[in-house]
Amino acid sequence: MRFASVLTLALVIALAPNAGWGEDHGDSRSNWFRVSWQPGVLPSTIEGHVDNTSPFRAIDVRLQIEGVDAANHRMGERLVWADDDVAPGGTTSYFAQTIPGAVDYRITVVSFELIAEGSVVDDAE
């Protein structure tokens, strides 16, 4: 019975969108992660946090950073990994170089794995 519940949950997670929200966007297609960003301490960098709101440990969290100009036109993108695994209810950080011409960023969690009791539950790539 427990295996069936975990399998059902894995299927639901695999079919659910896995986007985070940018600091000033407030839209979230998934409640698994919240993502924020701010200018970095080092010049030409941004940094932010990934909050895991799921009841599972998240590993291999990968983010897409899309830079946009003042007219909301796409200026480029970067893919980065979150710094650490994220415990349930926990937070990790990430760092990236800025995108030339970008004045704002849209950050999305594009892939991750969830771990429950020492086993992989889902690869939401």
Image (cartoon, rainbow, N blue to C red):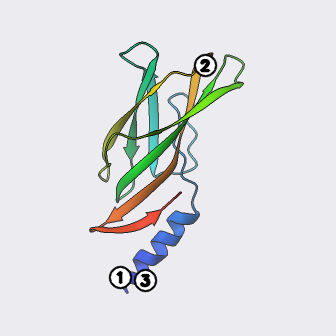
Mark 3 Cα-neighbour bin, 10 Å: few <14, some 14–19, many ≥20: few
Residue that sits furthest to the bottom in the current view: 1
Amino acid on which disc 3 is placed: Ala
Q: Which residue is mark 2?
A: 102
Distance, label 2 to label 3, CA atoms, is: 46 Å
Classify 29 as above or below 96: below
Which mark is first along the chain, 2 or 1? 1
Amino acid on which disc 2 is placed: Ala
Residue at the image point whose x is 57% and y is 60% from the top: 16
Mark 2 Cα-neighbour bin, 10 Å: few <14, some 14–19, many ≥20: some
Quarter of the image with the N terminus in it: bottom left
Q: Secondary structure at mark 1?
A: helix
Mark 1 Cα-neighbour bin, 10 Å: few <14, some 14–19, many ≥20: few
Residue at the image point whose x is 40% and y is 19% from the top: 40
101 or 54, nearer to the observer? 101
Contact check, label 3 and label 1, Cβ < 8 Å:
yes
Residue 85 image position (x, y, % from top left): 32, 49
Classify 65 as above or below 100: below
Q: Secondary structure at mark 2?
A: loop
Residue 8 image position (x, y, % from top left): 48, 76
56 or 118, nearer to the observer? 118
Contact check, label 1 and label 2, Cβ < 8 Å:
no
Q: Secondary structure at mark 3?
A: helix
Distance, label 1 to label 2, CA atoms, is: 48 Å
Q: Which mark is residue 67?
A: none
Which mark is first along the chain, 3 or 2? 3
Q: Which residue is mark 1?
A: 2
Residue 66 image position (x, y, % from top left): 59, 32
Classify 9 as above or below 40: below
Q: Which residue is mark 3?
A: 4
Distance, label 3 to label 1, CA atoms, is: 5 Å
